[in-house]
Amino acid sequence: MLGGTFDPVHVGHLRAAVELREALGLDGVHMVPAAQPALRDRPQVSSGQRLALLRLGIGDAEGLVADPCELQRDGPSFSADTLASLRERYGATARLIMALGHDAFLKLADWHDPERLFALAHLVVIDRPDHDSPLSTRLEALLRGREVGSVEALMAQPAGALLRLRLPSRMAISATDLRRRLAQGESVRYLLAPDVERAIVAQGLYRGDAGR
């Protein structure tokens, strides 16, 4: 599971999903747009538009799935609830993994029911070249005894561990900066998948709100 607002989905998201699948030997990666992220502002465009852009971005990429499960639930999008639905779908012995970026990882102790995340899945933290901050005391306590150093150790159990993973591409692309560029009419070429860029331009999305 690779969740996010995908507001909009960009090539950093998509390449990370491909490289996660390769690095971890995954059967598939569920890319899950959040309906109402609990710790972030409401996305600038509708959930349906973000899902449609995500599907365009994925295209025919093998093993990547645009999963609308959080958009079909009412209220804030809690990752623990999404993992619970995936655990029910795939069974108790399946190895489930939730991937998140380093910026989101630093706030993990503030998430809804973070202990439950580890009861349901492994966590993989995707290193980013522009994020290198010390862990809070609460986050250190949450992670104590959970961190492993290899994919093999991670996959030894269905859930409960954390692995830090440096992906080959490590693209430091900011959706916030993309929204600013789109609002100001600046180029976003090669930052978005071509079909995503064309759809955004054709529908006039992200215009006139450079502050978000």
Image: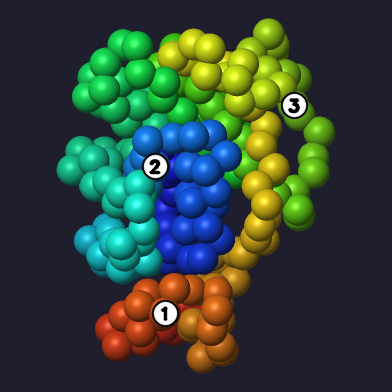
Whole-number angstrom distance, CA of label 2 to CA of label 1: 21 Å
Dividing the image into 4 quarters, which one contains the N terminus? top left
- Which residue of the protein is positioned furthest toward the bottom in this rendering? 185
What's the mark number on residue 136?
3
Question: How would you rate the neighbour count of disc 3 (Cα within 10 Å): few for under 14, some for 14-19, many for 20 or more?
Answer: few
Q: Is residue 52 above or below residue 149?
A: below
- Disc 1 crowd rating (10 Å Cα; few below 14, some 14-19, many 20+) is some
Hey, what amino acid is under mark 2?
Val
- Give the camera-side residue of 62 and 68: 62
**Front one among 10 and 63:** 63
Q: Secondary structure at mark 1?
A: helix
> What is the quadrant of residue 211 in the picture?
bottom right
Q: Secondary structure at mark 2?
A: strand
Residue 194 is labelled as: 1
In this rendering, the answer to whether 127 lies above or below 149 is below
Residue 106, image quadrant:
top right
Instruction: Report whether 209 appears left or right of 71.
Output: right
Q: Is residue 13 visible?
A: no
Name which residue lies at 35% across and 47% down: 63
| Image quadrant where residue 190 sits | bottom right
The answer to whether the residue labelled 1 contacts the one labelled 3, judged by CB atoms less than 8 Å apart, is no
Q: Residue 164: percent from the left, percent from the top?
A: 67, 32
Disc 1 residue type?
Pro
Task: Tell me the residue at 35%/18% (across/down).
Answer: 94
The residue lying toward the viewer, choosing from 174 and 147, is 147
Position of residue 84 measured from the top left corner of the image (x, y, whole percent): 30, 22
**Residue at horizontal 37 percent and vertical 40 percent from the top:** 28
Kind of residue at disc 3: Ser
Q: CA distance from mark 1 to mark 3?
A: 39 Å
Mark 2 sits on what residue? 29
